[in-house]
Image: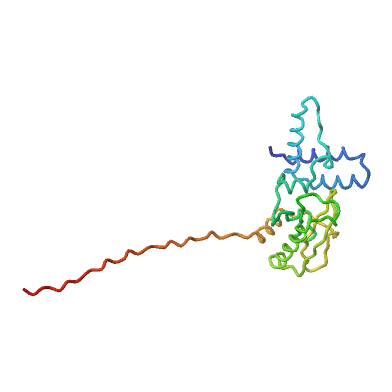
């Protein structure tokens, strides 16, 4: 199922209506998540609700706001929505950010949700440092910033390339285009060249030819 632009807009409108009664801070956070949900995320949400409906066919379930669904970071980690994954280890995954403060902004998301930055796994920070080193080389950034931030009830790590002006996790973000995100992904991607197996050709040993002296009669 592929949602049309009209269907995406209608679903977002319905979700926005359902968060009107939330406290201001929660409503703002939920609205931000709704605004950033793409068609794939909305489809995944609908499939989840359809599965719940099949389990309880007598109970009609309208589209529910994101705070009652799996969060967007969990959906990225679990592969429910497509992402530009640059690297990962046992504890975290690094993806190109859709909401970027500079070209090449990367989010390092712990594979297990973390609320407090003090509980960030060491693997998340080591992955951020690894990506930052690559970033300086691949994107020709003058420097990089590694900063934590909180969104949707989780703490993540931002790896931000700095070019001509200072930026940080709180700088004004913009909607990164698919072309820009793909360009960053392609720069980071390491294409492994296939190993060329050397075929050893065994040379047949030349048979020794015995030269016999001609016998004089």
Q: Quick check: 182 left or right of 125?
A: left
Closer-to-camera residue (97/172) = 97
Q: Where 174 falls versus 143 (above or below)?
A: above
Closer-to-camera residue (80/123) = 123
| Quadrant into which the N terminus falls | top right
Task: Name the colouring of the figure.
Answer: rainbow
Q: Which quadrant of the structure image shows residue 93? A: bottom right
> Residue 37, position in %: x, y?
78, 45
Q: Which quadrant of the structure image shows residue 7? A: top right
Q: Where 70 falls versus 105 (above or below)?
A: above
> Residue 45, position in %: x, y?
76, 39
Q: Where 82 falls versus 180 (above or below)?
A: above
The residue lying at 79 percent from left, 54 percent from top is 99
Query: Residue at the top extreme?
Result: 58
Q: Quick check: 102 left or right of 18?
A: left
Query: Residue at the left extreme?
Result: 217
Q: Which quadrant of the structure image shows residue 156? A: bottom right
> Residue 169, position in %: x, y?
83, 59
> Residue 62, position in %: x, y?
82, 33
| Quadrant into which the C terminus falls | bottom left
Query: Residue at the right extreme?
Result: 23
Q: Quick check: 166 left or right of 188?
A: right
Numbered circles on residues, count: 0
């Amino acid at each position: 199922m592929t949602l049309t632009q009209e269907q995406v807009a209608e679903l977002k409108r319905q979700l926005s209506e359902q968060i009107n009664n939330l406290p201001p801070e929660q409503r703002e956070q939920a609205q931000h998540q709704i605004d950033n949900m793409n068609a794939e995320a909305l489809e995944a949400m609908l499939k989840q609700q359809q599965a719940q409906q099949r389990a309880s066919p007598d109970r009609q379930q309208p589209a529910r706001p994101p705070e009652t669904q799996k969060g967007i970071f969990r959906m990225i980690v679990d592969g429910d929505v497509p992402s530009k994954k640059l690297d990962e280890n046992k504890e975290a995954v690094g993806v190109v950010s859709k909401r970027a403060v500079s070209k090449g902004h990367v989010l390092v998301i712990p594979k297990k949700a973390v609320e407090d930055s003090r509980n960030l796994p060491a693997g998340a920070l080591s992955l951020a440092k690894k990506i930052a080193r690559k970033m300086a080389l691949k994107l020709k950034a003058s420097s990089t910033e590694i900063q934590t931030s909180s969104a949707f009830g989780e703490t993540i790590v931002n790896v931000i390339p700095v070019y001509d002006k200072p930026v940080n996790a709180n700088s004004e973000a913009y909607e990164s285009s698919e072309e820009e995100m793909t360009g960053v992904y392609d720069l980071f991607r390491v294409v492994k060249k296939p190993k060329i197996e050397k075929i050893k050709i065994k040379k047949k040993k030349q048979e020794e030819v015995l030269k016999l002296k001609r016998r004089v009669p």
